[in-house]
């Protein structure tokens, strides 16, 4: 005769939330939601145990408060068996938080067959052999369950990384600054060319104006003064010296230049038409 005993399990499960203590996001709180409803708020290093009904659930976390501007939510989907306990680890990763199932309690329904044989022969006749699948190790079943739960996690979404953003801004700023400097240099060159052309134009206009109103007699006398010693340098290159036509002595090039400057100054000074340079009454 056999007696079948089955362990009776509760219709609820327990989840344990453990937030690792870390310097990253130290002052940021983590809001935990179960199926869209807030169930806990964990600070750095906090832990909390929550009783939930058995079934399929979605556990989501969202950083809130200081330093959570660019953070996004993460979630994991799991099947809670009645009477089991699940432990989740919440820790910062890069610019966000992650939630990972770290382990679950052993929850396997066992069936125990007990017999009360009257004799040794009867006990042997009622002996039953276990199927190979009944001898499967409990550790292997737990490992398979954890693997399935990890596969059910939502894929990670792209997260904005402030460090990359800062590097991009610096690089763009450098190129913009270079373009601005090139633009400034080009504008400076264009302005200088405009000023040079304007000054040349004014000089030519003034020279033409002076030429038109200059006394021809004064201009003729001035041109004669500028011819004094005109060929001295050519004679020095040909003969190696310059002869003073007044005294007949040989002069060096420096002495000839000084003598020429004095004579030209005296010639212009003695111009009889200098008071009528721009004509009488000009």
Image: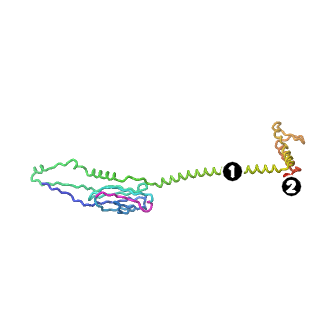
The x and y percentages for residue 145 are 29, 52
In the picture, the quarter occupied by the N terminus is bottom left
- Residue at horizontal 79 percent and vertical 49 percent from the top: 208
| Magenta highlight on residue 63 | yes
Q: State which region is magenta.
A: 55-68
Figure check: 101 above or below 247: below
Q: In the displayed structure, would residue 61 be above or below residue 126?
A: below
Give me the disc on residue 182: none
Determine the secondary structure under disc 1: helix
By secondary structure, the bulk of the magenta-drawn segment is best described as strand
The location of residue 139, given as percent across then percent down, is: 27, 51
Please name the residue shown 82% across and 39% down the image. Answer: 234
Query: Considering the numbered disc 2 on the image, is that residue within a helix, a strand or a loop?
Result: loop
Label placed on residue 281: 2
Outermost residue toward the right in this view? 247
Quarter location, residue 235: top right
Left or right for 211, reference 86:
right
Residue, far top = 238
Asked if the residues shown at circle 1 and circle 2 are in contact, with their CB atoms under 8 angstroms apart, the answer is no
Q: Quadrant of the C terminus?
A: bottom right
């Amino acid at each position: 005769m056999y007696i079948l005993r089955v362990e009776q399990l509760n219709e609820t499960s327990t989840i344990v939330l453990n937030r690792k203590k870390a310097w990253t996001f130290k002052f940021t709180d983590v809001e935990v939601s179960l199926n869209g409803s807030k169930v806990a708020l964990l600070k750095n290093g906090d832990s909390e145990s929550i009783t939930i009904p058995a079934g399929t659930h979605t556990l989501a976390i969202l950083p809130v408060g200081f330093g959570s501007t660019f953070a996004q939510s993460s979630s994991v989907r799991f099947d809670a068996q009645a009477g089991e306990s699940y432990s989740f680890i919440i820790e910062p990763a890069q610019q966000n938080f992650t939630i990972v199932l770290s382990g679950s309690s052993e929850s396997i329904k066992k069936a125990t067959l007990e017999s009360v044989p009257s004799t040794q022969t009867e006990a042997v006749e009622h002996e039953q052999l276990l199927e190979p699948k009944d001898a499967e190790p409990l550790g292997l079943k737990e490992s398979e369950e954890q693997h399935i739960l990890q596969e059910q996690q939502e894929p990670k979404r792209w997260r904005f990384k402030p460090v990359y953003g800062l590097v991009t801004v610096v690089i763009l700023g450098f190129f913009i600054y270079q373009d601005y400097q090139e633009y400034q240099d080009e504008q400076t060159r264009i302005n200088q060319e405009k000023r040079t052309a304007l000054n040349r134009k004014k000089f030519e206009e003034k020279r033409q104006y002076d030429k038109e109103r200059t006394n021809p007699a004064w201009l003729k006398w001035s041109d004669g003064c500028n011819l004094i010693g005109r060929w001295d340098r050519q004679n020095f290159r040909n003969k190696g010296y310059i002869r003073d036509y007044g005294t007949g002595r040989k002069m060096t090039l420096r002495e000839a230049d000084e003598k020429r400057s004095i004579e030209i100054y005296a010639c212009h000074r003695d111009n009889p038409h200098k008071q009528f340079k721009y004509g009488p009454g000009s």
